[in-house]
Amino acid sequence: MPDIPADAGLESLRAKLDSIDVRFLEELRARIETCVEIAHYKRENDVSMMQPHRIRIVQDRAARFGEEHGISQDFLRELYDLIIKETCRVEDMVIGSAP
């Protein structure tokens, strides 16, 4: 049986990580697409774009997930701050555009 170079194990793990990243980005894209649908609904039903209570719900859920899975709650809050900032930008574009 030939020796497997140590780098092969690392490359295998990196390939696994790359696959996870693709799924993560696809889910992020799907999240933003859903926010576009929400923005259309808000525009059509004259609902305010900014929903602070909803942002708190999302942030709190992320913090609980972090606590349950040993992931930094601060990291997850910062990550969701970025995600929410982008989705607000997208919602603003949709709500501000002509129907």
Image: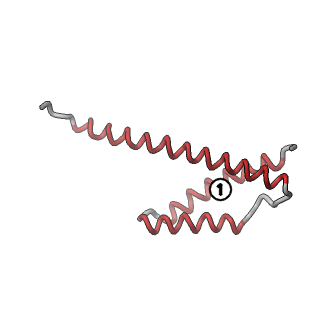
Left or right of 9 in this view: 19: right
Q: Residue at x 72, y 48 (%)?
A: 36
Question: Which of the 4 quarters of the picture holds residue 56?
Answer: bottom right
Residue 90 lies, in percent from the top left, at 72, 48
Residue matched to label 1: 84
Quadrant where the image shows the N terminus? top left
Up the image or down, 26 lies above or below 63; here it is: above
Counting the numbered discs, the total is: 1
Quadrant where the image shows the C terminus? top right
Up the image or down, 85 lies above or below 63; here it is: above
Left or right of 12 in this view: 27: right
Q: Residue at x 33, y 42 (%)?
A: 13
Left or right of 85 in this view: 15: left
Q: Residue at x 84, y 44 (%)?
A: 97
Q: Could you tell me the amino acid type at mark 1? A: Ile
Colouring scheme, one of rainbow, by chain, secondary structure, one colour: secondary structure
Name the outermost residue toward the left.
1
Q: Nearer the viewer, residue 28 or 34?
A: 34
Q: Nearer the viewer, residue 74 or 19?
A: 19
Up the image or down, 97 lies above or below 79; here it is: above
Up the image or down, 49 lies above or below 40; here it is: below
Label 1 Cα crowd, 10 Å radius (few <14 / some 14-19 / many 20+): some
Q: Please tell me whether mark 1 sits on a helix, a strand or a loop.
A: helix
Residue 69 lies, in percent from the top left, at 42, 64
Residue 20 lies, in percent from the top left, at 44, 44
Q: Residue at x 53, y 67 (%)?
A: 63
Left or right of 98 in this view: 39: left
Name the outermost residue toward the top.
2
Residue 83 lies, in percent from the top left, at 62, 53
